[in-house]
Image (cartoon, rainbow, N blue to C red):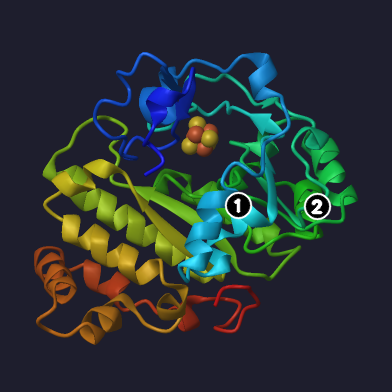
Amino acid sequence: MYYEGLDKFDRVYLSKVFTDTEVPEGVLGMGNVSYGGTGFFYDRAPSLPEEAEHCMTDYHLYDRWVQEKLDAGARRSDFQFYLDYSIGFLSRGCFRKCAFCVNRNYDRVCMHSPLEEFLNPERKKICLLDDNFLGHPRWKEMLDALKRTGKPFQFRQGLDERLLDDEKCRELFSARYDGTYTFAFDDVRDAGLIEKKLILARKYTDVRLRFYCFCGFDREDVWDGAFWRDDVFGLLERVELLMKYGCLPYVMRFGRYRESPFWGMYVTIARWVNQPGLFCKKSLREFGEMNGRRSACFKYLDDFERRFSEAAYFYDLKFEKVCALGADGRGEES
Ligand code: SF4
């Protein structure tokens, strides 16, 4: 409905973050419409002019839309980022050049905005969108600025756990953090390093940590049967390692997982893992059985195990047994 009447404006600026966000037909072709952002151009999105990039965020842009949703009975918590948070980037970019990432053309992490540029004193929390905050040499200076506000803050993107050291652990885990610390564990080949840093992190905190686990992306661009099998096992191996240290995986699937002969496994594992209440109580096998022997997810698990008997080991892993912290390890997840 907010696309109605666009022709009445001299200029309309349209942006989107995600490629799968729909824009009604004809809008992009209108003479008064300019559009940009990663949702349209992915890693080739042109930068905004400096004066647009570095102006104070208009936190009232969505007021009318949010109010309509609330009036219609929506939960306030579903709109908390519109209502309660100052949102911005302290740094941008990354040096890792992951092939699937919108940041793959960057060479390093750069300072982006000073905190005061997007901090609204009336908002009680802060949300950071930084791509790889810990990868900037001045991370501590930025973290200190966040701490000085006295407001709880969170990093929305997965932090780079591989960069943790004693100082970073001490500073990060003593902060007034908002919600669950979230890191990324995108590649099973990093398992050794991830585990080393988990051991380090556990010297400083026993709260539940969450890890985004990206899957369904072949870095060598070989989308054959062996890749799909190994990718599923790679995901299960990451889940096991995270269980061991009392961490919660969160499965994120690259769109091409749908091409996999085992696409149902990705769906089933994600449904199990991404519901922490279930994940902490039930093994993957129990999760399948809970859905019923006639359910699609039971069938996917059964088919996969018939083909690859070694899957049984992973199916029977149970968080409360594998987790070194015990099933009650502290955390904020409900
Ligand atoms: S580490 Fe994260 S931000 Fe950096 S390139 Fe890889 S996916 Fe992107």
For the residues marked 1 and 2, what is the alpha-carbon distance in whole angstroms?
Answer: 13 Å
Q: Amino acid at mark 1?
A: Tyr
Pointer 2 residue:
122
Residue sticking out furthest to the right? 148
Looking at the rendering, in which quadrant would you find the N terminus? top left
- Check the picture and name the quadrant holding the C terminus: bottom right
Question: Which is more toward the observer, 117 or 97?
Answer: 117
Q: Position of residue 54 (x, y in %)?
A: 71, 24
The residue drawn where x is 65% and y is 64% is 179
In the rendered image, the vertical position of residue 285 relative to residue 81, given as above or below: below
Q: Nearer the viewer, residue 274 or 281?
A: 274
- Seen at 47% across and 83% down, the residue is 321
Residue closer to the observer: 117 or 110: 117
Assess disc 1: are there few (<14), some (14-19) or many (≥20) residues with their C-alpha within 10 Å of its C-alpha. Answer: some
Q: In the rendered view, tell whether residue 162 sits above or below residue 201.
A: above
Residue 137 relative to residue 290: left or right: right
Badge 1 vs badge 2, beta-carbon distance below 8 Å = no
Left or right for 115, reference 158: right
Residue type beneath disc 2: Glu
Viewer can see residue 177:
yes
Label 2 SS? loop
125 versus 293 height, above or below = above
Give me the disc on residue 82: 1
Report x, y in % for residue 36.
44, 22
Q: Position of residue 319 (x, y in %)?
A: 46, 78
Other-residue count near label 2 (Cα within 10 Å), few / some / many at <14 / 14–19 / ≥20:
few
Residue 240: % across, % down? 42, 66
Q: Is residue 46 above or below residue 304?
A: above
Q: Looking at the rendering, which quadrant does residue 29 occupy?
A: top left
- Residue 41 is drawn in which quadrant? top left
Q: Secondary structure at mark 1?
A: helix
